[in-house]
Amino acid sequence: WELRLLSSAGARLKTIYVANPSLSDAENAELFAKLHDGDLILEKGQKPIVAYEDPQKGWHVLTSKQRNLRSVAVGLNMALQALFGFQGEPLARSRGR
């Protein structure tokens, strides 16, 4: 009901949804799919991490092979950049460390 309330209030464009760590990947995928009244099809091994609606490009669900603090932080960063109109650049890989 909370997702329906946010959606009906027009807050969807300003909201980032983060996967609930106490739910299974399938349950999180089901919740994210309900946000945009559609089916969420994930590639094998992909776990839903963050969902948001980009004002320019539409609905996005970010996934990762692992659901952990790092993947959530990266997902939040990507969603925030998109919502504020920025495009991030990939980090250079460190050498020897």
Image (cartoon, helix red, strand yellow):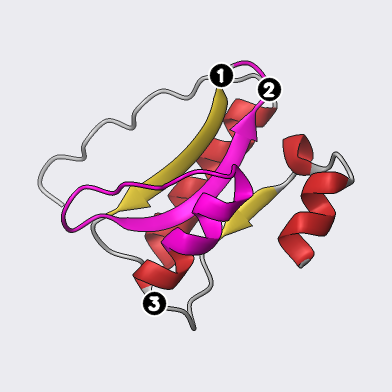
Instruction: Please say if the residues under marks 1 and 2 sit with CB atoms less than 8 Å apart.
Output: no
Q: Amino acid at mark 3?
A: Ser
Residue 11 coordinates in the image, percent (x, y): 83, 43
Q: Which mark is residue 24?
A: 3
Outermost right residue: 9
The residue at the far bottom in this view is: 22
Note whether residue 2 is visible.
Answer: yes
The mark that comes first in sequence, 3 or 1, is 3
Q: Position of residue 25 (x, y in %)?
A: 36, 69
Amino acid beneath label 2 = Pro
Per the image, the residue denoted by label 2 is: 55
Residue at mark 3 to residue at mark 2: CA–CA distance: 29 Å
Can you see residue 68? no
Which residue sits at x=25%, y=55%?
46
Mark 3 surroundings: few (<14), some (14-19) or many (≥20) residues within 10 A: few
Q: Residue at x 58, y 54 (%)?
A: 34
In the rendered image of this protein, does residue 69 appear above or below residue 75? below
Residue at far top of view: 56
Q: Which residues are magenta?
A: 29-56
Vertical position of residue 44 compared to residue 25: above or below = above
Percent coordinates x, y for residue 9 in the rendering: 89, 46
Label number found at residue 57? 1
Q: Is residue 5 above or below residue 56?
A: below
| Mark 3 vs 1: CB contact within 8 A | no
Question: Foreground: 94 or 58?
Answer: 58
Residue 13 is a magenta residue: no
- Determine whether the residue tagged by mark 2 lies in a helix, strand or loop: loop
Q: Earlier in the sequence, mark 3 or mark 2?
A: 3
